Amino acid sequence: MRQVERQQLIELGILTPDCDPRITTSQKVSPERKRNVRRWVKEREAMSGVLLTRILERLKRA
């Protein structure tokens, strides 16, 4: 598990900050839940990119 993935899971409340990063979450979270979380994170990242682009375009026009 990469550090970024671990941090995202901590922010979502799936892992705790004191959890050993080598421990996988497969025992704690179902594969379906993991897929849903990954999809949600990707959608959120995509949305933040779109919003950032819009904000930068508006700043250029101002």
Image (cartoon, rainbow, N blue to C red):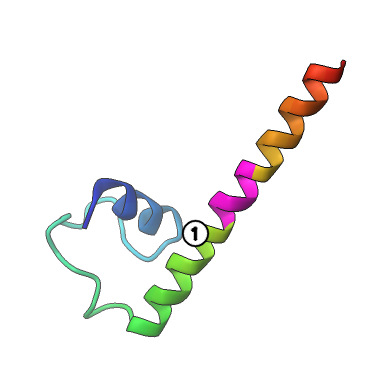
Seen as rendered, the residue at the extreme right is 62
Quarter of the view holding residue 44: bottom right
- Front residue of 51/30: it is 51
| Left or right: 27, with 49 as reference point | left
Q: Indicate the secondary structure of the residue bearing disc 1.
A: helix
State whether the magenta stretch is mostly helix, strand or loop.
helix
Q: Amino acid at mark 1?
A: Val
Seen as rendered, the residue at the extreme left is 22
Q: Position of residue 45 (x, y in %)?
A: 54, 50
On screen, 39 above or below 61? below
| Quarter of the figure that contains the N terminus | bottom left
| Left or right: 35, with 43 as reference point | left
Q: Which residue is mark 1?
A: 41
Residue count near mark 1 (Cα–Cα under 10 Å), binned few <14, some 14–19, many ≥20: some
Residue drawn 79% across and 20% down?
59
- Front residue of 13/56: it is 56
Based on the picture, tell me whether residue 45 belongs to the magenta stretch: yes
Q: Position of residue 49 (x, y in %)?
A: 61, 42
Q: Position of residue 54 (x, y in %)?
A: 75, 35
Residue drawn 32% across and 62% down?
15
- Front residue of 15/38: it is 38
On screen, 60 above or below 51? above
Quarter of the view holding residue 16: bottom left
Q: Which residues are magenta?
A: 44-49
- Front residue of 11/18: it is 11
Residue drawn 57% across and 60% down?
43
Residue drawn 12% across and 59% down?
22
Based on the picture, tell me whether residue 2 belongs to the magenta stretch: no
| Quarter of the figure that contains the C terminus | top right
Q: Position of residue 41 (x, y in %)?
A: 49, 59
| Left or right: 28, with 48 as reference point | left
